[in-house]
Amino acid sequence: MRNHPDATTTRTLLRAGMFAAVMLASASALAQATPSGNWKTIDDTTGKPRGLVEITEKNGVYSGRW
């Protein structure tokens, strides 16, 4: 016969898994919380890519260039 975990153990494992998933998702979201990087611009009328904008940060000041 197999030993099955009781409901309390199952709930505890589910909660631990959910906590781990939320923590990983939070860390991933915070890692990308900066506007720095290369951004693709999209034409509003056609929906097609128009160009790239480079956003950089130096001493807390952001600047961009085409």
Image (spheres, rainbow, N blue to C red):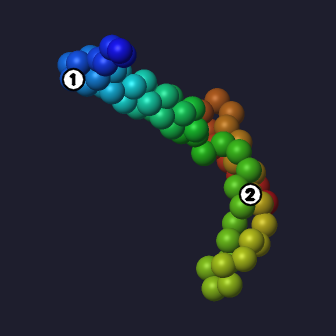
The x, y position of residue 31, in whole percent, is 57, 32
Q: Residue pushed farthest front? A: 1
**Which one is closest to the eye, mark 2 or mark 1?**
1
- Residue at position x 74%, y 57% from top? 53
Looking at the image, is 13 positioned above or below residue 37? above
Q: Counting other residues with Cα less than 10 Å from the Cα at mark 2, is it few (<14), some (14-19), or many (20 or more)?
A: some
Label placed on residue 53: 2
**Is residue 2 left or right of 42 when viewed as pictured?**
left
Q: Dividing the picture into quarters, in which one does residue 40 lie? A: bottom right
In which image quadrant can residue 66 be found?
A: bottom right
Q: Is any atom of residue 19 visible in this view?
A: no
Q: Tell whether 18 sits left or right of 62.
A: left
In the rendered image, the quadrant that contains the N terminus is top left
Amino acid beneath label 1? Ala
* Three-letter code for the amino acid on which mark 2 is drawn: Val
| Circle 1 residue | 7
Q: Quadrant of residue 11?
A: top left
Q: Considering only vertical position in the picture, is 28 above or below 64?
A: above
Element type where label 2 sits in the image: strand
Which comes before the other along the chain, label 2 or label 1? 1
The location of residue 39, given as percent across then percent down, is: 70, 55
Does the CB distance between marks 2 and 1 fall below 8 Å?
A: no
Drawn side of residue 4 relative to residue 66, left or right: left
Q: Is residue 18 visible?
A: yes
Q: Residue at x 49, y 28 (%)?
A: 24
Residue displayed at 60% across by 45% down: 35
Vertical relation: 11 (above or below) 64: above
Q: CA distance from mark 2 to mark 1?
A: 53 Å
| Residue at (67, 37) in percent of width and height | 57
Bin the neighbour count of mark 1 within 10 Å (Cα to Cα): few under 14, some 14-19, many 20 and up: few
